[in-house]
Image: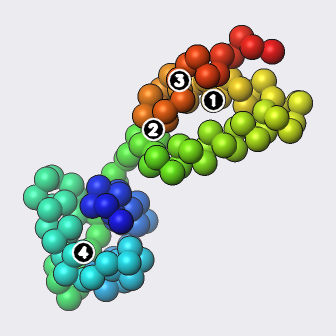
Amino acid sequence: MKRDARLYDLVQILRDGKLHTAEELAVSLGVSTRTVWRDMAMMAATGLPVTGERGLGYILRSPLMLPPTVLTPDELEALACGLRHVEANDPGLARAARNLLYKITTLLPQAGIGPDDMDPADE
């Protein structure tokens, strides 16, 4: 797992407001506790509201709101595939799926779906 994806996953886990040990986080992420220690130190140094220490655990001091448009490439691919499936197999929702896919291409250029690939005006 790449570091940026791991850090994103760490934040997602910590958003529950509970205390998490480095060992628990390491198991969840498939890394060593030492990697978790380094990641947590780096996150705290960059200003994220992370509190904790080795042996006790880690917690977010205050709620952290991540924009809903922060998606991993795999999440974007899954979303696009799901919307294309709905468009192809559910006539009642086809237009909504097509429009939503178009919005995703506009808001999330990293989705790799060009606006020419999906036009909401197409019927």
CA gap, disc 2 and disc 1: 13 Å
Note whether residue 15 is visible: no
Q: Earlier in the sequence, mark 1 or mark 3?
A: 1
Q: Residues within 10 Å of mark 1 (few under 14, many from 20)?
A: many
Where does residue 53 sit, x and y in percent of width and height? Answer: 16, 79
Q: Amino acid at mark 4?
A: Val
Position of residue 60 relative to residue 71, above or below, is below
What is the spatial separation of the Cα atoms under label 2 and label 3, in whole angstroms? 17 Å
Report if residue 95 is visible in the image: yes
Front: mark 2 or 1: 1
Q: Nearer the viewer, mark 1 or mark 3?
A: 3
Label 4, residues with CA under 10 Å away: few <14, some 14-19, many ≥20 = many
Give amino acid for label 3. Answer: Gly
Between the C-alphas of marks 4 and 2, the distance is: 25 Å
Mark 2, secondary structure of its residue: loop
Please, what is the three-letter code of the amino acid marked with disc 2? Thr
Where residue 22 appears, as percent x and y from the top left, is 28, 81
Label 3 crowd bin: few (<14), some (14–19), many (20+), radius 10 Å: some
Marks 3/4 in contact by CB < 8 Å: the verdict is no
**Residue at label 2?**
69
Sequence order check: which comes first, mark 4 or mark 2?
4
Q: Mark 4 or 1 closer to N-term?
A: 4
Q: Counting residues from the N terminus, which is met first, the one under dot 2 or under dot 1?
A: 2
Distance from Cα at disc 4 to Cα at disc 1: 36 Å
Q: Which residue is mark 3?
A: 114
Mark 2 Cα shell of 10 Å, populated few (<14), some (14-19), many (≥20): few
Q: Which mark is residue 50?
A: none
Q: Which residue is mark 4?
A: 36
Task: Left or right? Give the position of 38 relative to 2.
Answer: left
Image mark for residue 101: 1
Q: Nearer the viewer, residue 58 or 121?
A: 121
